[in-house]
């Protein structure tokens, strides 16, 4: 069984979980999307991420906002982007999470995301060639995503 970083006491009859391991998306995009969808209803989060993929709504970049341009439609914040690849992976996770909840007998219309966490996972080592026959490390970071919904 996977260890989750959620320290709340959870009622297993009202919650459903999913743990996405070693996902090949940007860690910065994953952190910003996790912060954005936490507290949303499950169906609203899926709809929001579909609009991000269509580039109708932007994700506010609050932490990783250095040299990030302003996007219209953001309330209370200026810097934002459209992380399409990360949004597609999050929609897959949300669909699996909804299936887990329905398997447990929960109503998918009343599910709210109470925990959304993204953090760095496994590192794939790599090298990039440099001048004079040298090489520098050029590693690739995979991420882990935790999502927990609760029926309310």
Image (cartoon, grey):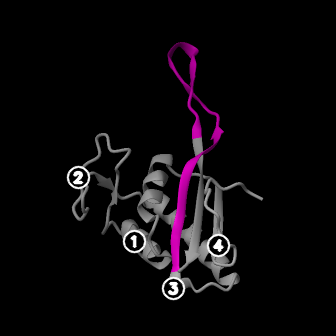
Q: Judging from the image, what secondary structure is the residue with disc 2 in?
A: loop
Badge 4: residue crowd in 10 Å (few <14, some 14–19, many ≥20): many
Q: First in sequence, mark 1 or 3: give its number.
A: 1
Which sits earlier in the primary sequence, circle 1 or circle 4?
4
Is residue 114 visible in this depiction of the protein? Answer: yes
- Cα separation, mark 4 vs mark 3, equals 14 Å
* Location of mark 1 (residue): 48
Q: CA distance from mark 2 to mark 4?
A: 36 Å
Q: CA distance from mark 2 to mark 3?
A: 33 Å
Give above or below for 107 relative to 87. Answer: below
Q: Report the disc number at residue 16.
A: 4
Residue at left 57%, top 15%?
Answer: 133
Residue nearest the viewer, comparing 132 with 74: 74
> Which numbered circle lies on residue 109?
3
Q: Are marks 2 and 1 in contact (CB under 8 Å)?
A: no
The span shown in magenta is 111-140
Q: Earlier in the sequence, mark 2 or mark 1?
A: 1
Is residue 137 covered in magenta? yes
Q: Can you see residue 85?
A: no
Sequence order check, earlier mark of 2 and 4:
4
How far is the residue under mark 2 from the one under mark 1?
19 Å
Question: Is residue 9 found inside the magenta-colored segment of the image?
Answer: no
* Label 1 Cα crowd, 10 Å radius (few <14 / some 14-19 / many 20+): many
The chief SS type of the magenta part is: strand
**Classed neighbour count for the residue bearing mark 3: other residues with Cα under 10 Å, few (<14), some (14–19), many (≥20):** few
Q: Of tags 1 and 4, which is closer to the observer?
A: 4
Write down the quadrant of residue 45 in the picture.
bottom left
- Pointer 2 residue: 70
């Amino acid at each position: 069984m996977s260890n989750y970083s959620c320290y709340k006491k959870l009622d297993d009859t009202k919650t459903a979980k999913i743990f996405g391991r070693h996902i090949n998306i940007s860690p910065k995009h994953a952190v910003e999307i996790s912060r954005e969808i936490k507290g949303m209803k499950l169906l609203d989060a899926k709809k929001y991420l579909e609009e991000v993929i269509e580039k109708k709504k932007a994700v506010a970049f609050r932490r990783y906002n250095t040299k990030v341009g302003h996007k219209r439609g953001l309330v209370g914040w200026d810097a934002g982007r459209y992380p399409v690849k990360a949004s597609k992976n999050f929609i897959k996770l949300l669909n699996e999470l909804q299936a887990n909840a329905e398997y447990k007998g929960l109503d998918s219309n009343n599910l709210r995301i109470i925990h959304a966490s993204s953090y760095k996972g496994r590192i794939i080592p790599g090298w990039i060639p440099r001048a004079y026959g040298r090489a520098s490390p050029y590693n690739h970071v995979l991420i882990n995503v935790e999502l927990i919904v609760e029926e309310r």
